[in-house]
Structures are given as structure tokens and as C-alpha cells.
Image: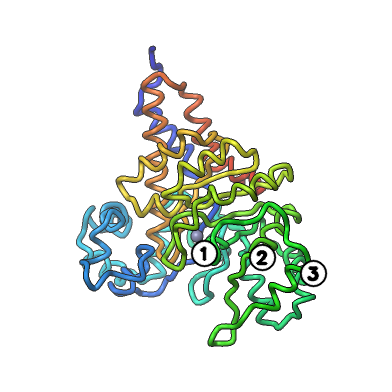
């Protein structure tokens, strides 16, 4: 087979196509002047560097920070960890974060607003850092916990929650059932009575606040989002050790997916690693299921190409979305975008060179995965 378009030319064209990503799942940042322990504590899903290990920089993520983020801050590639953190403090956390996020090539941010307020949390703040646009994704459990903190009566909870979700300006909802009870959600919506009983059983934390963890309530919340017609994200797979990874395989959602498949509401499985092949299978067999490989991409650094390749084995090209799952550090935006862009360019480029797809195919698939799939799922137009 003759390949008309040289690979280098395709790479250039693809990079242009992939320069305006829609990041469909990300979080706020800490823009304070972080010292090295504080920086390392935010690097990975661990609580911080292990006292028995070495440093969080001794990882694929650490190498990627030194290789790719150091030049954005004016340092040579592979600058030492101490030099990197010193340069970041010299610039100031806010300015360093601004430079980093602005270099990521992301134009639209869908921000999960469910985590703490002392960081830069609002969609607007994140978009301001990069000069992009932003939308909110509302976390179901956060909304529910706010209601519980207001001491709503158990028999009022359902109606009040539904009302709040309906008036929310968010363009999608997110469930963290995986974190609290695992992904074995039922194929039928719990009844109003079952919900009331469950809510009346919920206790409070030591500080008097609520931390929702009840299988009936998580199921009811997710079903309610689907009934309202909000695109619904599920945390699946990889996350910090608050979750039990054994209960987070997206295949456990099969009954829920089967029961919701004719509703016309997109279900988006986030992260998925190391179950990304299982997630890709679900995206193939269920019309309404979409997936991403955020979080694992930047953690796996230069070894992340294989995660994308394995995801594309089964996932239809219209079902894979781009996400960084950036949280805390602006570096996550840079690396999530750069490594995904590079992996996609390599995979599509190799298929083109092998004569397995044409240049038009490669560019079109790049556009789909980089932004158009997200625009379709969340019904947002190109800015
Ligand atoms: Zn996340």
C-alpha cells in the first residue's frame, strides 16, 4: 500500500487538530507556593512520599514532570526535583500554574466541583488560568451531603434533592459510588420508601457533617440523574486509597447499564485503569456508554501509550473522550494533555504508515477523541 501523506506531515496536522482539547473531567488546583513535601503530596494518588521509599519524583510521573514541565517554567529538560520546585516557588505558585495550564492546549474544561473549597475550585477560576471556557459537573454525593447537613427530614430528602439537581447549572453529574460502596448498582431505581429508610439510617461524622456511604442512596442518586436526563459520570478504577479498587471494576455496573440503555442519557466511565479494557468492552456493547483514561495517563508518563492502545482495541472511536483528571497541581493538566496527544498521534500515525487507515481518517478520529465526542455527549458547542 502506498501512503500519500508523510508521517511527519500527519503528525503536524494532528497536533494542530489536537490543540484545542475538551477536558471533560478535571478539578481545581492549589496555586499556593508549594514546598517540596507539599508538592510531592499532591503528585500521585498516594498520601505523600513513603517514609520507607524514596521520593514521589522517582516514578514515571516524576520523570515526566522533570522532562516536560521543567521547560515550560524555563528550566532545561530533566532538571532536578529541587531545582524544579525552587523555580516554581521563584515564579510563585499562581504564575507557575498559569504558565503550565496555558501550555496544555486545552480550550474547554468540565470541572468537577465536588472537592474542597480552599483550592482554586470553580470552573471559572480554572478556565481563567488558561483563557479557555469552563462548565460545571455537579457531584451527586456532594449535593446530597449539603442537604443532609441542612438537616432535611428523611421523607423530604428525595424531593428536595431532585429539585436542587434540576435547577443546577451543571451540564452533567458525577457519581462517586465507587469510592463509598463500590459499583454494584441495581438495575431498578430504589423506591421512595427505601430511600427514606436509608436516609434515616445515615449517621454523622465526628465533626457533625455527613459522609454519604449507603448503597440505596448512591443508587437512588444515580438513577435520579438519569431520569432528569443529565449525562452521568461514574468514577471507575484507579483513585486514591479511600476506595477499594476491588469494587471499582466498571463491569460491576453492567446491571445498571443494561437497565438504563434505552433512556438516551450518556453514561461516562472515568479513569477505568487498570480495567480500561473492560470499560472499552462496555463502550462497544452499550450505546450510551463512553470512557476515558484520565489520571492513569499522566501517572504512567512515558509508558502511557499502551493504555491508549489497549483502550482503542474495542472502544468505538466515537466513545473515547479526553480527560486529564488534573487535581491539585497544574502539572497534571500539562502531562495529561501532552502524553495523551502524543499517544494518539503515535497510534494513528502508525496505523496510517501501515496503510491501515487514511490521512482523512486519522485527522477525523483525532478530532472526535480530542473534542467532538465530548461536545456531543454534553451537548456543548465549539467555542
Ligand atoms: Zn477526578
Q: Residue 90 versus residue 263: which sits nearer the camera?
A: 263
Q: Residue at x 43, y 21 (%)?
A: 356
On the rendered structure, is 44 left or right of 118?
Answer: left
Kindly check if marks 3 and 1 are in contact, taking CB atoms under 8 A apart as contact: no
- Residue at numbered disc 2: 216
Q: How far apart are marks 2 and 1 (CA)?
A: 14 Å
Residue 173 percent across, percent down from the top left: 64, 59
157 is higher (above) or lower (below) than 14:
below
Residue 107 shows in this picture? no
Q: Distance between the residues labelled 3 and 2?
A: 16 Å
- Residue at numbered disc 3: 159
Decide which of tag 3 and tag 1 comes sooner along the chain.
3
Q: Which residue is drawn at 42% across and 52% down?
A: 104
- Residue at numbered disc 1: 179
Residue 327 percent across, percent down from the top left: 45, 63
- Circle 3 residues within 10 Å: few <14, some 14–19, many ≥20: few
The quadrant in which residue 113 appears is bottom right
Amino acid at each position: 500500500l502506498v501512503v500519500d501523506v508523510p508521517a511527519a506531515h500527519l503528525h503536524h496536522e494532528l497536533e494542530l487538530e489536537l490543540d484545542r482539547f475538551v477536558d471533560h473531567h478535571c478539578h481545581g488546583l492549589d496555586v499556593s507556593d508549594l514546598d517540596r513535601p507539599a508538592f510531592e503530596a499532591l503528585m500521585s494518588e498516594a498520601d505523600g512520599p513513603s517514609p520507607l521509599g524514596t521520593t514521589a519524583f522517582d516514578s514515571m510521573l516524576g520523570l515526566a514532570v522533570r522532562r516536560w514541565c521543567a521547560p515550560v517554567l524555563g528550566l532545561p529538560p530533566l532538571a532536578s526535583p529541587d531545582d524544579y520546585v525552587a523555580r516554581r516557588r521563584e515564579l510563585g505558585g499562581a504564575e507557575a500554574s498559569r504558565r503550565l495550564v496555558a501550555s496544555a492546549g486545552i480550550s474547554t474544561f468540565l470541572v468537577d466541583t465536588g472537592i474542597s473549597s480552599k483550592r482554586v475550585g470553580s470552573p471559572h477560576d480554572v478556565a481563567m488560568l488558561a483563557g479557555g471556557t469552563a462548565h460545571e459537573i455537579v457531584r451527586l454525593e456532594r449535593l446530597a451531603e449539603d442537604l443532609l447537613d441542612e438537616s432535611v427530614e428523611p421523607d423530604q430528602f428525595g424531593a428536595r434533592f431532585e429539585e436542587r439537581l434540576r435547577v443546577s447549572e451543571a451540564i452533567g453529574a458525577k457519581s462517586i459510588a465507587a469510592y463509598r460502596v463500590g459499583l454494584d448498582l441495581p438495575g431498578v431505581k430504589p423506591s421512595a420508601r427505601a430511600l427514606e429508610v436509608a436516609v434515616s439510617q445515615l449517621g454523622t461524622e465526628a465533626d457533625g457533617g455527613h459522609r454519604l456511604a449507603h448503597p440505596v442512596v448512591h443508587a437512588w442518586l444515580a438513577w435520579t440523574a438519569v431520569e432528569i436526563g443529565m449525562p452521568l459520570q461514574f468514577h471507575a478504577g484507579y483513585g486514591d486509597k479511600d476506595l477499594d479498587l476491588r469494587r471499582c471494576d466498571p463491569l460491576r455496573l453492567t446491571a445498571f447499564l443494561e437497565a438504563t440503555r434505552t433512556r438516551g442519557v450518556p453514561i461516562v466511565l472515568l479513569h477505568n485503569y487498570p480495567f480500561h479494557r473492560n470499560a472499552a468492552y462496555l463502550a462497544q456493547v452499550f450505546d450510551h456508554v463512553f470512557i476515558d483514561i484520565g489520571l492513569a495517563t499522566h501517572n504512567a508518563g512515558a509508558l502511557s501509550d499502551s493504555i491508549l492502545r489497549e483502550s482503542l482495541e474495542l472502544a468505538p472511536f466515537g466513545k473515547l473522550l479526553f480527560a486529564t483528571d488534573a487535581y491539585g497541581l497544574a502539572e497534571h493538566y500539562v502531562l495529561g494533555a501532552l502524553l495523551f496527544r502524543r499517544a494518539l498521534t503515535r497510534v494513528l500515525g502508525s496505523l496510517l504508515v501501515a496503510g491501515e487507515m487514511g490521512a482523512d481518517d486519522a485527522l477525523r478520529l483525532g478530532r472526535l477523541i480530542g473534542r467532538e465526542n465530548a461536545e456531543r455527549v454534553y451537548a456543548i458547542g465549539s467555542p
